[in-house]
Amino acid sequence: MSTVERHTMPGFLSLVGRSWWVLLLYGILGVLFGLFALARPLSAAAAMVWAIGVLALAEGIVSLFAVFRDNVAVSKGWAIFYSLMSIAFGVVAITNPVAAAGGLLLFLAAWLIVAGIYRIIFAIRVREEIKGEWLIALSGLLSILLGVLFLASPLTGLVITAWWIGAGALIYGVLQIVAAFKLRTLR
């Protein structure tokens, strides 16, 4: 380590250590959202879709204004189509987030079924080239099963998805809090 690096590193570590509260804040928010999603999964799913709807609406409006600039990266037709689709999804997600979440879950179910079929076909085609191809086929079968379950009971699928997201947010939050207190020692 050079002399410059040795003198710079303690200052950097001190700066990072003084920012420990940012990670703590992220951690607390993650834990709170995780607990909320586990306790009230439908409300959490609706809140997530609503937030995504706000982002889609904002992006659609900005993209629509960008169409009128001379240097659009794609054709104006595609840019207008994308803008209007973003705005439409945003409006639906904001005004009826539960219905939008159900629609997204049905789309996810269809994708899971198609992805599962693809994996099974892929596993059959590569069975002589690789070992363990049965794991790929098994993942395809599980993907199809999950897709069918989502189609059979979208509400249950929505609850389970929100629980998984909640559990992930809870773990993320706890890890952020632990990291924050470790960084605090660098002050």
Image (cartoon, grey):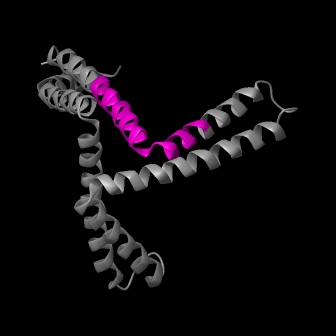
Image position of 23 (left or right of 101): left
Residue range corresponding to the magenta coloring: 145-172
**98 w.r.t. 184: above or below:** below
- In front here: 173 or 108? 108
Q: Residue at x 23, y 17 (%)?
A: 178
Image position of 16 (left or right of 137): left
- In front here: 72 or 17? 72
Image position of 106 (left or right of 47): right
- In front here: 121 or 107? 107
Q: Residue at x 64, y 49 (%)?
A: 114
Secondary structure mostly taken by the magenta-highlighted segment of the chain:
helix
Q: Residue at x 23, y 62 (%)?
A: 95
**90 w.r.t. 177: above or below:** below
Q: Residue at x 30, y 31 (%)?
A: 166
- Give the quadrant of the N terminus: top left
Q: Position of residue 88 (x, y in %)?
A: 33, 71
Q: Position of residue 140 (x, y in %)?
A: 66, 37
**175 w.r.t. 38: above or below:** above
Residue 152 lies in the magenta stretch = yes
Residue 64 lies in the magenta stretch = no
Q: Quadrant of residue 134?
A: top right
Query: How many numbered dots are placed on residues in this image?
Result: 0
Q: Position of residue 151 (x, y in %)?
A: 51, 46
Q: Quadrant of residue 9?
A: top left
The answer to whether any part of residue 72 appears in the image is: no
Image position of 131 (left or right of 141): right
The answer to whether any part of residue 104 appears in the image is: yes
Q: Position of residue 12 (x, y in %)?
A: 20, 27
